[in-house]
Amino acid sequence: MFFQRVRSFYIFSLGFLLLLLFASGIFAYLVSPLRDPTFQPDSANAGSLVPWLQGVTEEHWLLGANILAFLLSTNLTLILWQRWVSNNNDWLLRFINMVFAWVILFSVFWIMFMIYLLQQWLVD
């Protein structure tokens, strides 16, 4: 009963994270300097040209990408852990597999988010 509630919480939070990820992608697309017709790529002026976002630096975009990658990879790793917890009795091997899965998921999501931010010219 307890694991059923935990599993449903993880799945609900995954849905919320995917919604947050989708909203963040739309937001990054809308504030991208590529929407401005006067923007010249390759001029070392990445970042949003929207006036109320002038204080948002590249570090903020990188922090947001790190947070999203961390949350998404952690959530997916916990969902995988819930599925594998009853199938495997060796706790050390299961723990090493979960750490390895988390590192792989985090790396993949972080690279994907960075490629998207680079394509939108929000980071250099």
Image (tube, rainbow, N blue to C red):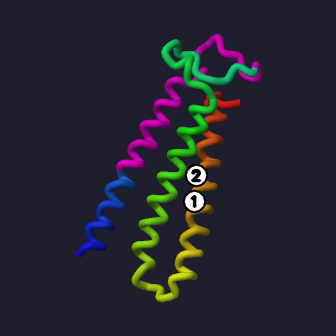
Number of numbered discs on residues? 2
Q: Residue at (61%, 62%) from the top-left corner?
A: 103
Q: x, y (%) of residue 89?
A: 47, 88
| Residue 73 belongs to magenta span | no
CB atoms at circles 2 and 1 under 8 Å apart?
A: yes
Q: For the residue carrying disc 2, how many other residues have a C-alpha within 10 Å: few (<14), some (14-19), or many (20+)? A: some
Name the residue that disc number 1 marks: 105
Residue at point 52%, 19% (across, down): 53
Q: Residue at x 47, y 86 (%)?
A: 88
Q: Is residue 34 magenta?
A: yes
Left/right of residue 90 with respect to residue 85 in the rendered view = right
Q: CA distance from mark 2 to mark 1?
A: 6 Å
Residue 106: x and y in percent read: 58, 56
Residue type at mark 2? Phe
Element on which disc 2 rests: helix
Image quarter in which the C terminus is found: top right
Q: Is residue 108 above or below residue 45?
A: below
Specify start and end residues of the magenta stretch as a single range.
16-43
Tell me the quarter of the picture where residue 83 sits: bottom left
At label 1, the amino acid type is: Leu
Can you name the residue that lies furthest to the front here? 92
Locate the N terminus by quadrant: bottom left
Tag 1: Cα neighbours inside 10 Å, few (<14), some, or many (≥20)?
Answer: some
Report the residue marked by disc 2.
109
- The secondary structure that dominates the magenta segment is helix
- Quadrant in which residue 40 is drawn: top right
- Residue at (47, 36) in percent of width and height: 24
